[in-house]
Image (cartoon, grey):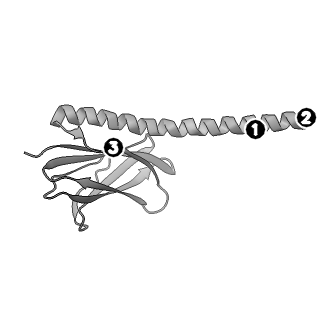
């Protein structure tokens, strides 16, 4: 009888621990989602930008020498783009670099902040790469998001 209750208690404990870890992780993703939503409202109201791509949300390890993630985007000629990075509350510094399909760096934001912004007005429709790094984070892993916004070129 004791073994039955011990196994049930252990199982219940494991389920509770797993569910608390899931909600803890979801909280950081929610922070990133909220920041992207706020940025979309600000960019729309201030400069007339509209969201052009689905938000991209991921995690990045901050262990080692600035590990990078890359996001590939198709951007259209005739659109002015603003690409914004945001990250969770543990993130102190986030950087973005934007490259064209020939690996030419078009723009970068290395300011010591956690909301980098790069812009481009493609001369032709093509594939572009966004390089994402988080050189300073209070945790071993940070959640981040990338929002891509555009408006008709003038």
- Which residue is at a point 17% across and 33% down the rendered structure image? 46
Of mark 1 and mark 2, the one earlier in the sequence is 2
Q: CA distance from mark 1 to mark 2?
A: 14 Å
Q: CA distance from mark 1 to mark 3?
A: 38 Å
Residue 109 shows in this picture:
no
**Relative image position of residue 150 (x, y in whole percent):** 20, 44
Identify residue for label 3: 54
* Callouts 1 and 2 close, C-beta under 8 Å: no
Is 35 displayed left or right of 100 in the figure? right
User: Between residues 7 and 25, which one lies in front from this camera angle?
Assistant: 7
**Label 1's element?**
helix
**Relative image position of residue 96 (x, y in whole percent):** 30, 54
Question: In this rendering, which labeled residue sits more in front, label 2 or label 3?
Answer: 3
Of mark 2 and mark 3, the one earlier in the sequence is 2
Identify residue for label 2: 2
Question: In this rendering, which labeled residue sits more in front, label 1 or label 3?
Answer: 3
Query: Crowding at label 2, few (<14), some or many (≥20) Cα neighbours within 10 Å?
Result: few
User: Between residues 125 and 90, which one lies in front from this camera angle?
Assistant: 125
Which quadrant holds the C terminus? top left
Residue 60 shows in this picture:
yes
The label on residue 11 is: 1
- Which residue is at a point 41% across and 52% down the rendered structure image? 136
Which quadrant holds the N terminus? top right
**Label 3's element?**
loop
**Label 2's element?**
helix
User: Between residues 153 and 89, which one lies in front from this camera angle?
Assistant: 153
**Relative image position of residue 152 (x, y in whole percent):** 13, 43
Is 146 displayed left or right of 50 in the figure? right
């Amino acid at each position: 009888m004791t073994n039955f209750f011990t196994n049930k208690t252990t199982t219940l404990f494991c389920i509770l621990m797993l569910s608390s870890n899931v909600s803890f992780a979801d909280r950081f993703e929610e922070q990133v989602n909220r920041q992207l939503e706020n940025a979309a409202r600000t960019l729309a109201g201030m400069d007339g930008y509209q969201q052009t791509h689905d938000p991209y949300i991921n995690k990045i390890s901050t262990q080692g020498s600035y590990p990078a993630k890359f996001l590939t985007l198709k951007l259209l000629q005739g659109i002015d783009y603003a690409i914004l990075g945001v990250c969770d509350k543990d993130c102190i510094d986030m950087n973005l670099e934007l490259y064209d399909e020939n690996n030419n760096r078009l723009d970068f934001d290395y300011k010591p902040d956690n909301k980098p912004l790069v812009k481009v007005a493609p001369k032709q429709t093509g594939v572009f790469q966004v390089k994402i790094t988080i050189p300073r984070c209070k945790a071993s892993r940070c959640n981040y998001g990338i929002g891509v916004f555009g408006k008709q070129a003038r």
